[in-house]
Image (cartoon, rainbow, N blue to C red):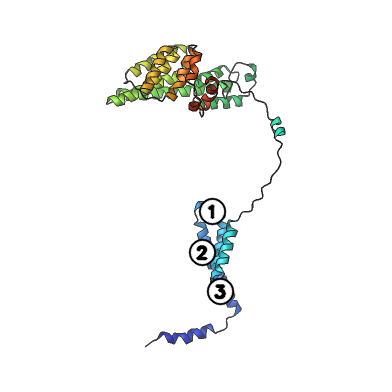
Amino acid sequence: MWHPNALYPHLISILQQPNAWDTLLILIFALLLIWGTVALIISFLLPKRYRLYRRQIFIFMTVMSFGLLFLGLLFALPMLIFGIGWATYRQSRPDYGVMDFEGYYAQLPLIDSRFHEGIIDISTHGHWKEVSTDEKIKSLKILYESKDRHNIGRIKKFLSDSSEETRLYAFSLISSYEEKLNSDLKKLTKHLYEAKDETEKDHYAYLVAETYWQFIFHGIADSQLATFYTQKAEKKLQMSRPNSKVSMLLGKIYIYNREFATAKNHFEKAIEQGMPRQAVNPFLAEIAYEMRAFNRIPDYMHRDEHGVNLKMKSICQMWSR
């Protein structure tokens, strides 16, 4: 019967045999090649956030795997500490300098910010005619994408520009926006008449009225068409049951028609129906201004309400107590 003790003399004789240096070098090279290949594969499978340090991690894993085989656990801990420190160490040598702030600010142009100033000054002054066509087109693009009040109306001023390229670009922006609103109006009107219940009817009636209002808000409609669009919007809002959004839109329409007392009633009704006072106060302040009730404006301009709103901040600073 075979016994494990019979294997010991054979193993001892193998271990006691002298090994040639070339055999040891081949063994070391083979192990280095194996562990290097394994480390290379692992470094390519690292998550994305560690790929920046792929080279350092590859060297660290190769040295650790190869070193553990020959140096044993005694030197494994110092190697581990050294390897982690080397792989994560980044030498930072910031270059500090002294900056002359007074001289730096002296080089900047002095800009005087005016009240109600916008990002683009579109006027009939002579300096606007000196602006290049490229800059005009860039300005038109910014103005079109701003979706701000009367932005299309301002673009209309470029239809009489001296540059043909500017005129064509302005016309394309106006026509594309008007075509979009007409397309939306057609789809929403179809949904309105196909509404199955009162809730859906209220929803689409408000959206149709709001789309009519967009023709006025963006300055697409002239003074004659504006009356037509306001009448259309009012009729659609009458199809919807009263709510805060309907009252807000009616208030905006009556402000445009300069019926300020009626507009104020609708805004106050919107507050009663649940609209936040913070959203209504700017319109009430506008009504007070138009009615020359200047002493009432500070009642609607509270700094804690409009401190973050950059559009309202300068107005609030001027009129708040």
On the image, which quarter does residue 97 sit in? top right
Residue 264 rendering spot, x and y as whole percentages: 41, 15
Q: Nearer the viewer, mark 2 or mark 1?
A: 1
Q: How many marks?
A: 3
Front-lying residue, 204 or 92: 92
Which residue is tagged 2? 38
Residue 99, image x, y percentages = 70, 38
Q: CA distance from mark 3 to mark 1?
A: 31 Å
Identity of the amino acid at label 3?
Leu
Residue for badge 1: 51
Element carrying mark 1: helix
The image shows residue 270, relative to residue 224, as above or below, that is below
Residue of label 3: 27
In this view of the protein, can residue 209 be seen by the observer?
Answer: no
Label 3–label 1 contact, CB within 8 A: no
Q: Earlier in the sequence, mark 2 or mark 1?
A: 2
Residue closest to the far bottom: 1
Q: Residue furthest left?
A: 196
Instruction: Specify whether 85 is left or right of 285.
Output: right
